Every structure is written in C-alpha cells, then in structure tokens.
Amino acid sequence: MNAVNLRVEVHCLKPSWVNYENNNYRVYLNDDLLTERTWIWLKTTVIDENIWVNIPVGSTNTVRVDIVLQEKSVAKFALRNLRVIDIPYTTTHINDLTISFTI
C-alpha cells in the first residue's frame, strides 16, 4: 500500500437567479466514505478536495460524489480534474459524478 494524494474538484452549478442553497455531498473512494460536506453554495462554486489515502500501486479505483439535495433544489454537481500527485496515473470519466483512475 502507498500513501496517495488525490486532488479532485467538486463543482456546483446553479442558475444565476438562485441566491444560495444548502446542500450536502459525500466523496467516496470505491465504497469508502472519504469526506462529507455541507455547504451554502453561491451560484457557481468549486471546492478542491485534497485527500490522502492508502491504495496499492497497480490498482484501479473509482472516486464518486453522492449528492444530498434539499427539496426543490436546482443544483447540478460534477467531479472534474482528478489528479494523483507525484504518481503516474490514467483517468476515465464514467459520468459527471464518477471518475475511475489507475495508478
């Protein structure tokens, strides 16, 4: 197992007529919960998650974000720009909320 530094951006996009919303999201690596945040999102917001995990070199893993939306929410979330710091890797976007990577 290697200590690996992952960086991934969580994007929240909302129409300009929405002042703010309070929504939660959870970031998972495979089936393990890494972080959960509650945030008051102002129109378009990007949070850069900086996560350290132990994973074996040569493994394929999946990072996903699960969104907990408030009733009548108009927010759209996405994961973007996954980076593995100082280790060669490849990524595949499965959909807006899931990215697979191999180190």
Image (spheres, rainbow, N blue to C red):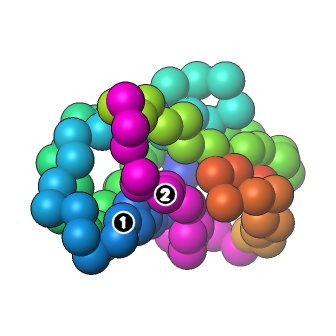
Hey, what amino acid is under mark 1?
Lys
Q: Which residue corresponds to the image point at 55% horizontal and 61% vertical from the top-left?
A: 79
Residue 26 at x, y percent in the picture: 44, 34
Q: Is residue 91 magenta?
A: no
The answer to whether residue 90 shows anywhere in this view is yes
Where on the picture, by quarter, is residue 90?
Answer: bottom right
The reply to whether callout 2 and callout 1 are in contact (CB within 8 Å) is: yes
In the image, residue 30 above or below residue 90: above
**Quadrant (top left, top right, bottom left, bottom right) of the N terminus:** top right
- Mark 2 and mark 1: Cα distance apart in space: 6 Å
Residue interval drawn in magenta: 71-88
In the image, residue 56 above or below residue 43: above
Q: Residues within 10 Å of mark 2 (few under 14, many from 20)?
A: some
Hey, what amino acid is under mark 2?
Lys
Residue 8 at x, y percent in the picture: 48, 62
Q: In the depicted view, which residue is nearer to us: 36 or 19? A: 19
Task: Compare marks 2 and 1 and give the one earlier in the sequence.
Answer: 1
Residue placed under numbered mark 1 in the picture: 14
Q: Which residue corresponds to the image point at 73% horizontal and 44% vertical from the top-left?
A: 62
Q: Which residue corresponds to the image point at 67% horizontal and 24% vertical from the top-left?
A: 31
The answer to whether residue 48 shows anywhere in this view is no
**Quadrant (top left, top right, bottom left, bottom right) of the C terminus:** bottom right
Residue placed under numbered mark 2 in the picture: 76
